[in-house]
Structure formats: C-alpha cells, structure tokens
Image (cartoon, rainbow, N blue to C red):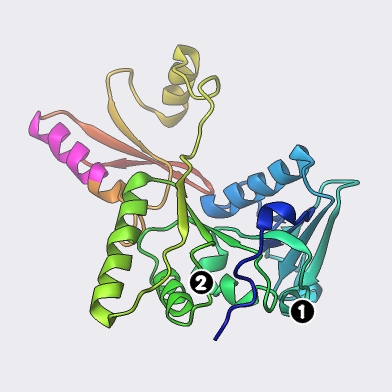
Amino acid sequence: MTEPWRGINIAAVSRSKLAIINGFLKLDESAPHGTNHAAFAICEAFTRCGAYSALDVFVDSVASLNRPGGPRFVAPKDSPVIAMNKKRLPSLRDQYEAIYALGTASLFSIPHALRPVADWCPVISEIDCTHGAGQWSNLFIAAMTKELRETDGLIFKAAATEQAFTDVWSDWRDRFNKDLPMPQSLVSLNGISLEDNQHNPVLRTETRRELGLSADDVVFLGFSRLEPRLKGESKSARRSVASTLARNDPGLLVKNDPVGARVIEVG
C-alpha cells in the first residue's frame, strides 16, 4: 500500500504550529518526579523561542485539568497556547510541523497513533527512562504496526540509553524477521547550572549544622528515588557506601525527600 506522506518535499512546506502531547502540566515544586518538571521547563522554552504561531497542547481530558492533587495546566500569559483533547489530533491534518511527545507520553500511550491521518508530520518522542516496561511495549507496538516511521525522532538523555535502544531494535528485527523502521535519534544531555551548583563553604557549614553533622562526617547525597528498576543511582550508591565502610569510615546518607532531608546512618 502506498503511503501518501512519502515523496513530499518537507522543506518546501511551511507550517508554523507545533502539537505538544501532555504539555504545560505543572506539579508542585516539591514533587519528586523530575521528568514532569523537565517537561514543563521544555514547554516554557518553546514559548520563549517564539518559533511557532501556535502551541496546541493535547491531553486526555481538558475537563479533568486542574483537579485537586493533580497537575495544573499552566500556560504563560499572552502565549499562543491552547489545550484540546487528544482524540481531536488525528483529524487535524496538514497543520503541524511536528508532534512533540514529552517524556511521560511514551510511558503510558502510543503518541505515534495520534498522528493526523496521511500526514508527513513527524512525532518527536522524549525517552526519559531506559527500562520502562510500558514504554518498551508502546514503542514495539508502534514499530510493528508501522505507526512509527523512520522520519520520526527519539531524544535520549544519555548515550548509553541510545545504545540500548539501538541494540533492542536490532534484536527485534532479527527475532521477528521484519524490516522495522528505525527513527532518527539525538542525545541531548540534561544540563545543570555551573553557577548554582558549585561548592559553597558557607552553605556547607550551615547545612551540616542544620542536619547535626560534624565537619568530618562522610556524607552521601542522593536526590532521586533509589529504585533499581528505574535508574542506576542505587548501584553507584552501594559501591560508594561499600568503599567507605571498607576504609572503616563512618557513613551517612542524606536523602532528599519531598518533605525534606533525612539522615540515614549506613555505617
């Protein structure tokens, strides 16, 4: 079957609108989900760059936005942002330069299935979790059903994650004897502020005093959830603690919980 989107000179087609799946959803600052915070920051960046005449946000249900305990839909004042239900997106053909699926979208849905019918519009998906079972299943289904195209894109936060996906794609091709389309990929490392994240002897002294730590206590500082199935922090933490205890040093783990810092003695 001929795919009508093939053969189109995309460079000659001008579109000034961007579709964003699950965009501008803001959690409380104390919430532990870094993926959500990063997604909101990216949406703000889209607004600041001013490259699009419209930023159309697609969510499961507009009527369910801003309910107590859930994320809030927060669009910058006087910005070209509107929210619509996801079910409308497949019918909005020939409008969007791209569909940008934020990190949470691929974990719980197949954003490629929302692409407008017979449209060349690429789907750009952020991959925030290397070992998310739902994410793997959704990408597998998208690839096997040809909803995912080689003109689509995946944005990774680490080169190791990109390599893992490349290896899995090769395995799928060999195992199922199918020429599965491999989307374009890009590694975009999470940046940090060197100005905000530098050694500060005054803050060090004040923080240790607040936590009841001496100047000589050996401390391990953890910012995210120590869950082996999600990230690698637990593995590196175990190695650091083991190395410290082998030297007979006292060890303390300072865990940054949503309710505040906790001190856990580990040696």
**Residue at position x 42%, y 80% from top?**
144
Q: Is residue 112 above or below residue 44?
A: below
> Closest to the observer: 114 or 208?
114
Q: Residue furthest right?
A: 78
Residue numbers of the magenta segment: 236-247
Which secondary structure, mark 2? loop
**Residue 133 percent location from the top left of the image:** 38, 72
Q: Please give left or right for residue 147 compared with residue 169 in the image.
A: right
Q: Please give left or right for residue 73 compared with residue 130 in the image.
A: right
Tell me where residue 213 sits by quadrant: top left
Tell me where residue 222 sits by quadrant: top left
**Residue 158 percent location from the top left of the image:** 39, 45
User: Of the residues shown, which amino acid type is indicated by label 2?
Assistant: Leu
> Closest to the observer: 12 or 138?
12
Q: Quadrant of the C terminus?
A: top left
**Residue at position x 71%, y 78% from top?**
90
Which secondary structure, mark 1? helix
Mark 2 sits on what residue?
148
Q: Is residue 21 above or below residue 163?
A: below
Q: Quadrant of the N terminus?
A: bottom right
**Pointer 2: residues within 10 angstroms few (<14), some, or many (20+)?**
many
**Residue 81 percent location from the top left of the image:** 83, 55
**Alpha-carbon span between mark 2 and mark 1:** 18 Å
> Closest to the observer: 248 or 156?
156
The answer to if 95 sits in the magenta stretch is no
Tell me where residue 172 sits by quadrant: bottom left
**Residue 108 percent location from the top left of the image:** 53, 73
User: Of the residues shown, which amino acid type is indicated by label 1?
Assistant: Ser
Mark 1 sits on what residue?
91
